[in-house]
Image (cartoon, grey):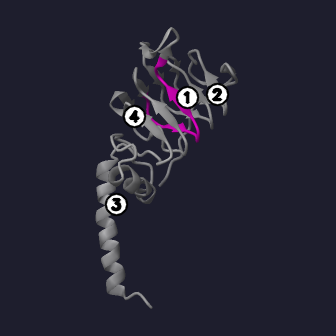
Amino acid sequence: MALSTERLYAILNHLDFLISWVRWIYPTMPSYPSYVLLLFLFPQKVLRLNGRSRWPVHFTSRVLYPERIGVGIDSAPGMSIGCYIQGRNGIRIGNNVRIGPGVGIVSANHDPSDYDKWINTEPIRIGNNVWIGMNAVITAGVTIGDNVVIGANSVVTHDIPNNVVAVGNPCRPVKHKAQYQPTVTE
């Protein structure tokens, strides 16, 4: 059965409305195509999987205490599959932060003498232009500087300075990183 031109235009008009609605729901994601953001809409906003998050979150990821998580432009913790983001003590994420699959960002730990209590720490701070590789873990109270790459499977237990590539368990800077150069589209 062939699709008539009028029917195709009607479908595209509905999609255009939907795409503008997606842009309204996720305003801090300007560089992501609307059709990508549309994939997050149904599970997150209709089925309410991570529904309180103000940024796109994959349905297999888990975001706890999203109201205590500050997210910059073009950053979306939990957008990759299988992430665990816990913001009990707060998380501050800068602009243009990419987070790989399976990443854990945990801002609060249990008290070792009473597992029903939480230890209060400073919020986790992640700078601008940061890439966190697959299965990395960011622990409570650390600060990651600007223009940093955290290697896959790294465990960040201490602060990481600006402009470095850091890897390992515990995560340590291994080399200097050149300034971030965004792709210019015309």
The residue that label 3 is drawn on is: 19
2 with respect to 182 (left or right):
left
Q: CA distance from mark 2 to mark 3?
A: 37 Å
| Classed neighbour count for the residue bearing mark 1: other residues with Cα under 10 Å, few (<14), some (14–19), many (≥20) | many
Q: CA distance from mark 3 to mark 4?
A: 21 Å
The residue that label 1 is drawn on is: 147
Amino acid type at circle 3 is Ile
Helix, strand or loop at label 1? It is loop
The residue that label 2 is drawn on is: 177
Instruction: Pick whichever of labels 1 and 2 is earlier in the sequence.
Output: 1
| Classed neighbour count for the residue bearing mark 2: other residues with Cα under 10 Å, few (<14), some (14–19), many (≥20) | some
Q: CA distance from mark 2 to mark 4?
A: 22 Å
Amino acid type at circle 4 is Gly
Are the two marked residues, 1 and 2, in contact with CB atoms closer than 8 angstroms? yes
Residue 185, position as x, y percentages in the image: 49, 52
The residue located at (62%, 35%) in the rendering is 135
Amino acid type at circle 1 is Asn
Disc sitting over residue 72 in the figure: 4
Are the two marked residues, 3 and 1, in contact with CB atoms closer than 8 angstroms? no
Residue 87, position as x, y percentages in the image: 42, 27
Helix, strand or loop at label 4? It is loop
Q: Which residues are magenta?
A: 93-109
160 with respect to 45 (left or right):
right
Are the two marked residues, 3 and 4, in contact with CB atoms closer than 8 angstroms? no
Helix, strand or loop at label 2? It is loop
Q: Is residue 15 magenta?
A: no
Amino acid type at circle 2 is Lys
55 with respect to 20 (left or right):
right
Residue 5, position as x, y percentages in the image: 36, 86
Instruction: Pick whichever of labels 2 and 3 is earlier in the sequence.
Output: 3
